[in-house]
Image: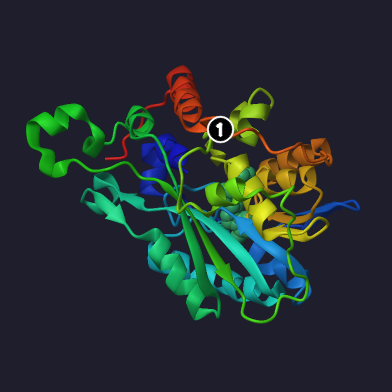
Amino acid sequence: MIAATQEITRQNIQGTTRVPTSYQPMKIQNDEWTMILGDACEEIKTIPDNSVHYIIFSPPFSSLYTYSDSERDLGNSRSDVEFLAHFQYLAKDLFRILLPGRLMSVHCMDLPRMKEREGIIGVKDFPGMLIRMFEAKGFVFHSRVTIWKDPVTEMQRTKALGLLWKQLKKDSSMCRQGLPDYLLTFRKLGNNPEPIKHTSAEFPVDLWQRYASPVWMDINQSETLQRYSAREYKDEKHIAPLQLEVIRRSLELWTNPNDLVFSPFAGIGSEGYEAIRNGRKFIGIELKRSYFNQAVANLKKATYKAKEPPQSHIDTFQQAVLMDRTSTEKGAVKNGEE
Ligand SMILES: C[S@@+](CC[C@H](N)C(=O)[O-])C[C@H]1O[C@@H](n2cnc3c(N)ncnc32)[C@H](O)[C@@H]1O
């Protein structure tokens, strides 16, 4: 989501006008997936209790980035308090629809506090806010994985004061580390009626040790749906889609084939795309029509891809760093995080 940070314009930082919106919900579906156009807080009510095997999503990051002028857009909140007040209605239903014993993963990061918006430079504990809210709705905090991100790439993209080398020489009291992504996972208490079993062939111990690491150093930041569809969807560069490898690993670890996967903030469909490619089913809800249309197009493209044998464990870390930096150099966008 740091990509979203980079894209912030002064107008976004100052907030957009909020427009009360009514909408005509729309549903496009087939045997494998369903995409619903609408407000997740309302449309989730159509999903039965205890019917979803796994939930994975990247929420709007409080008011860091606004996707639309709709007052239904969670990114269109005036403050963190308002964001959480809005989100908690959805959180209650996320708990309701999840099968007992199963999991929900939420992608997030610490949020930069911006001088232009809050008068000070600093960092906010957004993951902590989410953890407290989901615990209050009955979820058990189950795990946190840190997704390593290159601070040089962040510096190139955001020009954040705290990452600049010239700031180190001037006064390093303002210098800080880069902001990684986190994948927070929560569990609904109860016995899992459909255990998720793996074989040694499909999940060898060295692969498990890699996935069990508290820090995923080897996520290729450039492997996103947007990268694949950039030419078609140039106008939607702000979406900052979830890295496909993060979704893939989570699905491998926490779902069975044919399980139903849900994303309340489906965006351009990354979670659904990987679910279908990996032989799972998907329901997604998205508020913004242009993203909804892209999600439908992406889901149509996704077809079940039989699992290839696990990759030899080459050092994908260096490869990921190189690819990340190369893509930044090609498409660097400046902004004013700080
Ligand atoms: C971080 S993006 C999700 C990107 C998605 N993970 C992907 O990879 O394509 C958050 C999304 O939430 C959507 N959104 C915000 N408020 C919403 C609401 N009330 N109901 C449904 N979607 C909403 C935004 O339009 C945006 O597409």
Residue 20 can be seen, yes or no = no
Coordinates of residue 143 in the picture (x, y in percent): 50, 64
Q: Amino acid at mark 1?
A: Lys
- Residue at the top extreme of this rendering: 330
Nearest the viewer among 277 and 112 is: 277
Nearest the viewer among 130 and 286 is: 130
Coordinates of residue 77 in the picture (x, y in percent): 45, 59
- Disc 1: which residue: 237
Seen in the picture, residue 85 relative to 252 is either above or below; the reply is: below
Nearest the viewer among 9 and 270 is: 270
Q: Quadrant of the C terminus?
A: top left
Coordinates of residue 297 in the picture (x, y in percent): 78, 37
* Residue 310 position by quadrant: top right
Residue shown at 20% from the left, 51% from the top: 120
Nearest the viewer among 78 and 122 is: 122
* Residue 335 position by quadrant: top left
- Residue at the right extreme of this rendering: 31
Seen in the picture, residue 4 relative to 101 is either above or below; the reply is: above
Residue 177 left/right relative to 260: left
Coordinates of residue 127 in the picture (x, y in percent): 42, 61
Seen in the picture, residue 267 relative to 40 is either above or below; the reply is: above
